[in-house]
Image: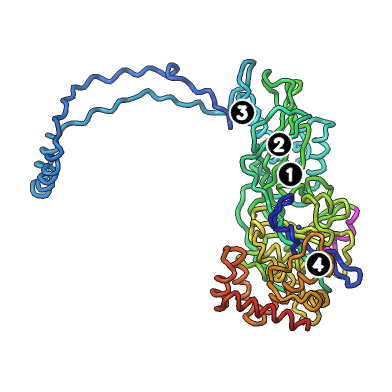
């Protein structure tokens, strides 16, 4: 299920795209998201062209505006009536146009910026550094794809924080079966000032938006489904020689540290998948006349960072449909996590309303420390799991391992993986449809069991009887500080409303309604008329009545 914040980026007041699920309740076994101007050659640098020989030009006769319409009619008649020779003769008598004036052309220089020298403007140094860093990062990417750790670390200053971070990342990324790694410097390098707090702004970050949160339910039998995933081609790092060491630099950049942002397009397991993007900060030193990477900063919270593989050592297991990862202290859980994730993926694939299921579902199991840092942390206390959109059609699911019991994990995984399969690439920004997003995920998590066995019924009953809830459906989204029963009631109302639609109209039409609202941006009333042939006002009233009768 998705928590209130899961459909808006972290630190934003809007709904985010990550889906959270509440932590388990102790009594119910339930877990509650320039480049600079390059110096061009001047005209004097170009070879001089001889002036064209003067051509005598007879000035055209004065034209009277009243004469030209007549001439046009005559010309038309002549062209239609006389032979081609006559037409050519007529054209030959018309005034000749003035010859074009040929201006000398300047061919801009090609190739990389020249190495800066003393006296060059700062932009020249920045452009040159950007080109050099891009080249080093391309070589590093090729080393990563090839499994060459020495080549991957060659850009870093030995003994620096960057060297240690890169050594950990190399092992984790290889364990996650990285198949695409395409770096690109997003900003011009700027001289690093340790006292400054400003951050270079990337030209295009492709920042991800968190998606939805979920509430857990009791374990149940899981129906199977045939995976329908398809892959979208992407470009992996092209093979190139691994760097042999830091690049030598020109004297104009000596003794300076530079900061910049780097975008990494990346993918895991599937070679031809559509890549996700992450943007990180880096600091490079030019001390001693060599260009070296000295610090790697985690991706920003506004880009839903840091990602687990950026900041944590991970152990990984992969199956036909899923990738699961956790920290070494939870290594023993990997076999069970993978089994539960593979079974949940078979269910979630049925809810890929776009027609294409994810190429791999990515699941990260977080301990207490990781839960507070991965993807910015800052989730409601009742959250047991969430799914966050990371671009390229991918969602990454995080499970809160702090209080998560084995008995509720299968339901939680079905819920969260259904978010990953059903939500649009950019996550959810339609607050009025929270009940629909969570209701569909709860419907998948329930695994087809009868309504009377849904564990959130007591919470819904409390909402209906004690609060006299009579709608609308959009009113049940829980706040970050909601009590456990209020969270359970919100998810329960969503589940019952979706269950009513499925029982009445069938799953196929209900999914078409979901796609219209969440993917196509169609209003609830128009979508209801199109998919169900009813007004939204009447349909919502029927859903509310069904909810009340289910707990009455």
Crowdedness near tag 1: few (<14), some (14–19) or many (≥20) residues, C-alpha within 10 Å: some
Q: Earlier in the sequence, mark 3 or mark 1?
A: 3
Give the quadrant of residue 16: bottom right
Q: Earlier in the sequence, mark 1 or mark 2?
A: 2
**Disc assigned to residue 127:** 3
Asked if the magenta segment contains residue 100, the reply would be no
Classified by dominant secondary structure, the portion drawn in magenta counts as helix
Q: Secondary structure at mark 2?
A: loop
| Residue 256: percent from left, percent from top | 73, 23
What residue is at 78 percent from the left and 37 percent from the top?
150
For discs 1 and 4, the disc positioned in front in the rendered view: 1
Whether residue 545 is visible, yes or no, is yes
Cα distance between the residues tagged 3 and 2: 19 Å
Q: Is residue 136 above or below residue 544?
A: above
**Disc assigned to residue 90:** none
Cα distance between the residues tagged 2 and 4: 41 Å
What residue is at 69 percent from the left and 76 percent from the top?
497
Q: Quadrant of the C terminus?
A: bottom right
Magenta residue span: 329-337
Mark 2 lies on residue: 199
Mark 1 lies on residue: 300
């Amino acid at each position: 299920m998705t928590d209130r914040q899961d459909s808006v980026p972290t630190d934003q007041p809007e709904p985010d795209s990550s889906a959270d699920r509440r932590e388990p309740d102790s009594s119910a076994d339930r877990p509650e998201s320039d480049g600079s101007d390059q110096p061009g050659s001047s005209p004097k640098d170009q070879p001089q062209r001889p002036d064209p020989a003067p051509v005598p030009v007879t000035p055209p006769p004065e034209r009277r505006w009243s004469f030209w319409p007549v001439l046009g009619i005559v010309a038309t008649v002549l062209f239609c009536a006389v032979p081609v020779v006559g037409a050519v003769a007529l054209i030959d008598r018309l005034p000749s146009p003035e010859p074009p004036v040929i201006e000398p052309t300047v061919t801009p220089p090609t190739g990389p910026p020249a190495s800066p020298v003393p006296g060059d403007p700062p932009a020249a140094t920045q452009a040159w550094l950007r080109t050099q860093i891009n080249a080093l990062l391309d070589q590093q990417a090729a080393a990563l794809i090839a499994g060459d750790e020495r080549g991957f670390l060659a850009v870093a200053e030995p003994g620096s924080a960057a060297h240690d971070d890169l050594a950990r990342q190399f092992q984790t990324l290889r364990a996650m079966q990285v198949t695409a790694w395409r770096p690109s410097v997003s900003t011009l390098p700027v001289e690093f000032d340790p006292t400054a707090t400003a951050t270079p702004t990337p030209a295009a970050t492709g920042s991800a938006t968190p998606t939805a949160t979920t509430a857990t339910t009791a374990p149940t039998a899981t129906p199977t489904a045939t995976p329908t995933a398809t892959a979208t081609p992407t470009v992996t790092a092209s093979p190139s020689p691994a760097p042999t060491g830091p690049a030598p630099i020109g004297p104009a950049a000596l003794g300076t540290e530079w900061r910049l942002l780097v975008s990494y397009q990346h993918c895991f397991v599937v070679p031809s998948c559509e890549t996700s993007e992450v943007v990180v900060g880096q600091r490079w030193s030019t001390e001693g006349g060599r260009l070296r990477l000295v610090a790697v900063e985690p991706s920003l919270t506004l880009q839903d960072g840091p990602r687990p593989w950026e900041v944590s050592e991970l152990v990984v297991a992969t199956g036909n449909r899923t990738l699961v990862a956790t920290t070494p202290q939870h290594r023993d859980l990997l076999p069970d996590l993978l089994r539960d994730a593979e079974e949940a993926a078979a269910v979630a694939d049925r809810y890929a309303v776009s027609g294409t299921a994810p190429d791999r579902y990515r699941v990260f199991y977080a301990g207490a420390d990781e839960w507070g840092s991965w993807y910015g942390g800052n989730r409601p206390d009742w959250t047991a799991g969430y799914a966050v959109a990371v671009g390229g059609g991918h969602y990454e699911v995080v499970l809160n391992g702090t209080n998560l019991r084995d008995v509720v994990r299968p339901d939680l995984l079905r819920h969260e993986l259904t978010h990953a399969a059903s939500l649009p690439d950019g996550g959810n920004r339609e607050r009025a449809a929270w009940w629909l997003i969570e209701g569909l995920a709860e419907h998948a998590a329930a695994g087809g069991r009868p309504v009377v066995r849904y564990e959130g019924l007591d919470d819904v009953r409390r909402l209906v009887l004690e609060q006299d809830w009579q709608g609308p459906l959009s009113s049940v989204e829980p706040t970050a500080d909601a009590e456990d029963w209020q969270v359970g009631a919100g998810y329960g109302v969503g589940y019952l409303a979706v269950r009513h639609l499925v029982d009445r109209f069938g799953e196929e039409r209900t999914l078409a309604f979901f796609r219209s609202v969440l993917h196509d941006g169609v209003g609830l009333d128009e979508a209801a008329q199109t998919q169900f042939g009813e007004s939204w006002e009447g349909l919502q009233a029927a859903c509310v009545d069904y909810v009340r009768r289910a707990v009455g």
